[in-house]
Image (spheres, coloured by chain):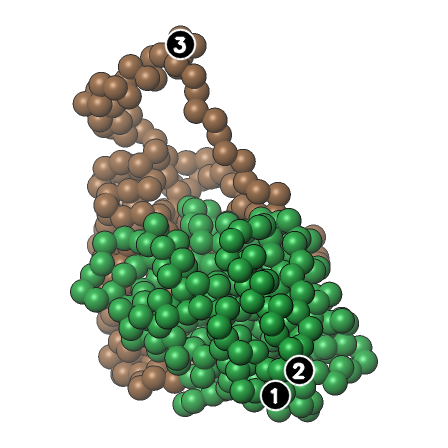
Chain colours: A green, B brown
């Protein structure tokens, strides 16, 4: 695994896990969730990357601008910048792996950002959406349940800023209306059933490429914080995500 | 990178991974490097990105800062040598200092830790004299008579909870169910504190070595620490002279996720590092 800076002003921190055997004709870009969900998912993403590397597929993970180790102040974040970051990561991953085809995997908001970035990117041949945020308004409702009092125009959730501009971007999200690349295969992996996942599955029926939804019952309390830094590695789901991206 | 922030990927031969933040001013140039340790399983970014914020703020004051992942945390691979967790983490702090000394010529260090990181920093400081400063947030705490008196006083002020407590003891009121972590959740092993006398002896050693100490306790530790000067009362045999800066933050939570509390802590640590380094430079000259 190599850590490096890339993207605009070298402001994004990426990690590339090269294939340890063989070599696929595609590379995977993994898209983290947001905030506390990112903290809890970081090690699970490392696990996904290592397992894919063993299956012969290179993987790039990265922190969006103003998150994790990347440059920037979280109070200035906008959703559109994160979508651009995914596009930059796709370019970087293809360059590092020396391949054209890309598979995107994301968890929660990461799935949504991957979907938005895939729009108009024919190099994307597959998307694996793990418990995707289908409706931004619902995601905001979830965040607001854990939000502390607003300071100025910024909400704070588990220590992470959610500025007004980011809220506006999130509010507008409706994954059901995102046009995925025509030829791309879309796989929705869900840890539990809910009406949003069902609505996306229904919308995906109109997708011209292959589209499936699979239930892998597993823990999903990502937006949760405790005093001991509990993280989450849902093993069955990790295996499911790896299988879906490697197949 | 945003204006003024220069960061560089750091790896050790053993595969530990971290980020160096280079100084962006010369306020404390040639001072000790600051190491920011993991808290439990939380990777090098820190709770609510606190380690990133702290590192960049310290660098803006002129400090050279490294935040890294211990083995088995974040991007660092697990150890394979069978060392126990705590021993392994202390070994890794020393390995990291060796690497920084070899590559950058840094010879003195301030080590910052919250929770398990605070304990690891203490043990490393006892083993390695290159550590000249220690930041401990919610480190070791030992209850004493004054702690219990305060606790009792608070309880007596809350009659319903006294009644509930008595009821539970008598079996009249049911005890609340304890939640169990999900199968896949990693919870930091709570190894407990060493005996108080051992820690007191350790602080005695550090003070004799003129190690500067920044010690803070948050309100989340109220079951172990509930008044400002408890730290001094825990170690009556140690004369901390002017080496100790003690902060009690009853409104703050252990993970410092509240931005206001976090800002107080970050700013406090930055000011302390600048002051401690300035004093250190005087001692060195």
Residue A246 visible in image: yes
Front of the two marks 2 and 1: 2
Q: Which quarter of the image is occupied by the N terminus of chain B?
A: bottom left
Task: Judge by depth and name the residue closer to the eye, B218 or B35.
Answer: B218
Q: Which residue is mark 1?
A: A122
Chain letter belonging to callout 2: A
Q: Is residue B165 left or right of residue B150?
A: right
Q: Are marks 3 and 2 in contact (CB under 8 Å)?
A: no
Which badge, 2 or 1, is on the more N-terminal residue?
A: 1
Q: Which residue is mark 3?
A: B172
Q: Residues within 10 Å of mark 2 (few under 14, many from 20)?
A: some
Task: Judge by depth and name the residue closer to the eye, B214 or A97.
Answer: A97
Mark 2 on the same chain as mark 1: yes
Front of the two marks 1 and 3: 1
- Asked if residue B182 is positioned above or below residue B259 in the image, the reply reads above
Q: Is residue A119 left or right of residue A147?
A: right
Task: Describe the element under mark 1 as helix, strand or loop.
Answer: loop
Point out residue A115 in the picture as x, y percentages from the top left corner: 53, 75
Q: CA distance from mark 3 to mark 2?
A: 66 Å
Q: Are marks 2 and 1 in contact (CB under 8 Å)?
A: yes
Q: Is residue A73 left or right of residue B189?
A: left
Q: Which mark is residue A183?
A: 2
Point out residue A87 in the picture as x, y percentages from the top left corner: 51, 84
Task: Describe the element under mark 2 as helix, strand or loop.
Answer: loop
């Amino acid at each position: 695994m190599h850590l490096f800076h890339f993207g605009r002003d070298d402001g994004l921190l990426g990690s590339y896990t090269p294939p340890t055997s063989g070599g696929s004709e595609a590379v995977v870009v993994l898209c983290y969730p947001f905030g506390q969900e990112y903290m809890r998912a970081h090690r699970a993403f490392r696990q996904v990357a290592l397992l894919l590397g063993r299956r012969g597929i290179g993987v790039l993970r990265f922190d969006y601008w103003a998150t994790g180790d990347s440059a920037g102040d979280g109070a200035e974040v906008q959703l559109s910048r994160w979508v651009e970051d995914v596009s930059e990561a796709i370019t970087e991953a293809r360059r590092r792996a020396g391949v054209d085809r890309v598979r995107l995997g994301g968890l929660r908001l990461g799935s949504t950002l991957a979907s938005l970035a895939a729009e108009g990117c024919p190099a994307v041949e597959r998307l694996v959406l793990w418990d995707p945020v289908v409706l931004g308004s619902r995601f905001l409702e979830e965040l607001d349940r854990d939000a502390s009092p607003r300071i100025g125009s910024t909400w704070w959730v588990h220590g992470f800023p959610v500025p007004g501009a980011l809220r506006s971007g999130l509010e507008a999200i409706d994954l059901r209306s995102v046009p995925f690349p025509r030829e791309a295969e879309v796989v929705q992996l869900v840890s539990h059933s809910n009406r949003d996942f069902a609505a996306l599955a229904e919308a995906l029926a109109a997708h011209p490429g292959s589209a499936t939804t699979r239930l892998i019952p597993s823990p999903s309390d990502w937006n949760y914080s405790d005093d001991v830094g509990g993280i989450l590695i849902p093993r069955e789901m990790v295996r499911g995500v790896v299988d879906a991206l490697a197949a | 990178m945003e204006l003024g922030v220069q960061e560089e990927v750091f790896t050790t031969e053993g595969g530990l991974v971290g980020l160096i933040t280079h100084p962006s001013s010369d306020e404390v140039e040639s001072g000790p490097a600051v190491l920011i340790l993991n808290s439990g399983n939380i990777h090098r970014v820190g709770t609510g990105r606190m380690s990133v914020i702290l590192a960049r703020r310290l660098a803006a004051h002129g400090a050279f800062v490294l935040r890294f992942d211990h083995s088995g945390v974040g991007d660092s691979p697990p150890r394979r040598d069978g060392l126990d967790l705590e021993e392994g983490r202390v070994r890794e702090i020393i390995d990291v200092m060796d690497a920084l000394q070899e590559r950058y010529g840094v010879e003195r260090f301030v080590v910052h830790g919250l929770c398990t990181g605070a304990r690891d920093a203490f043990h490393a400081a006892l083993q390695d004299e290159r550590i000249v400063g220690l930041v401990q947030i919610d480190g070791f705490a030992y209850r004493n008579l004054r702690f219990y008196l305060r606790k009792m006083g608070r309880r007596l002020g809350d009659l319903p909870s006294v009644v509930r407590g008595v009821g539970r003891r008598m079996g009249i009121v049911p005890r609340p169910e304890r939640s169990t972590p999900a199968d896949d959740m990693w919870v930091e092993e709570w190894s407990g504190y060493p005996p108080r006398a051992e820690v007191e002896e350790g602080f005695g050693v550090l003070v004799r070595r003129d190690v500067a100490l920044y010690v803070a306790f948050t309100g989340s530790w109220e079951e172990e620490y509930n008044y400002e000067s408890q730290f001094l009362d825990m170690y009556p045999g140690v004369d901390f002279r002017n080496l100790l800066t003690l902060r009690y933050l009853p409104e703050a939570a252990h993970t410092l996720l509240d931005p206001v509390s976090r800002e107080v802590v970050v700013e406090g640590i930055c000011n302390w590092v600048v002051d401690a380094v300035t004093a250190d430079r005087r001692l060195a000259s």
